[in-house]
Image (tube, rainbow, N blue to C red):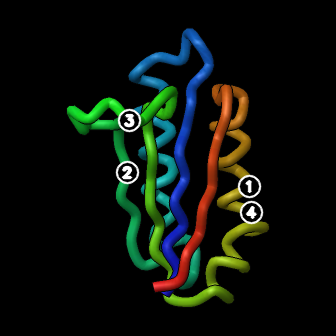
């Protein structure tokens, strides 16, 4: 399995309602992307305060590296990415094998 971890920094002025809508779009990819087994995401919630400027994150679990690789150029992923990118100040994506 592959875990696909993404952290977001939003541009100033991005509302909580916009962020919630973008997360609904991301969650909606499950069932549309073959091999995407699980989606989890939300705002930072630890009292440690170690998130720096990263306020939201998500994790997608894919059944294989091949499924993750097919997801990256998938038209539904590209559609959702196009909705999110204009609101991002920065993004980190980090994948690892389980």
The span from disc 1 to disc 3 (Cα, nearest Å) is: 30 Å
Report which residue position mark 1 lands on: 78
Q: Is 89 rendered above or below residue 43?
A: above
Q: Nearer the viewer, residue 82 or 88?
A: 88
Residue 66 left/right relative to 59: right
The span from disc 3 to disc 2 (Cα, nearest Å) is: 18 Å
Q: Residues within 10 Å of mark 4 (few under 14, many from 20)?
A: few
- Tell me which residue sits at (68%, 47%) in the image: 81
* Whole-percent x, y for residue 18 in the image: 48, 25
Could you tell which of marks 2 and 4 lies nearer the N-terminus?
2
Report which residue position mark 3 lands on: 50
The span from disc 4 to disc 3 (Cα, nearest Å) is: 34 Å
Q: Residues within 10 Å of mark 3 (few under 14, many from 20)?
A: few
Q: Nearer the viewer, residue 16 or 53?
A: 53
Element type at mark 1: helix
The span from disc 4 to disc 1 (Cα, nearest Å) is: 5 Å
Q: Nearer the viewer, residue 60 or 55?
A: 55
Comparing marks 4 and 3, which lies closer to the viewer? 3
Comparing marks 1 and 3, which lies closer to the viewer? 3
Verify CB contact (< 8 Å) between mark 4 and mark 1: yes
Q: Residues within 10 Å of mark 1 (few under 14, many from 20)?
A: few
Residue 49 left/right relative to 89: left
Q: Say the numbered circle drawn on residue 75.
A: 4
Q: Is 8 rendered above or below residue 34?
A: above
- Tell me which residue sits at (50%, 48%) in the image: 25
The span from disc 2 to disc 1 (Cα, nearest Å) is: 19 Å
Could you tell which of marks 4 and 3 lies nearer the N-terminus?
3
Report which residue position mark 2 lands on: 41
Could you tell which of marks 2 and 1 lies nearer the N-terminus?
2
Element type at mark 4: helix
Q: Nearer the viewer, residue 38 or 83?
A: 38
Element type at mark 2: strand
């Amino acid at each position: 399995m592959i875990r696909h971890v993404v952290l977001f920094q939003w541009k100033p002025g991005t509302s909580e309602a916009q962020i919630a809508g973008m997360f609904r779009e991301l969650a909606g990819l499950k069932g549309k992307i073959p091999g995407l087994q699980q989606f989890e995401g939300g705002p930072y919630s630890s009292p440690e305060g170690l998130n720096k400027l990263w306020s939201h994150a998500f994790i997608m679990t894919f059944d294989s590296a091949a499924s993750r690789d097919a997801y990256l150029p998938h038209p539904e992923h590209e559609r959702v990415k196009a909705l999110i990118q204009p609101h991002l100040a920065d993004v980190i994506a980090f994948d690892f094998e389980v």
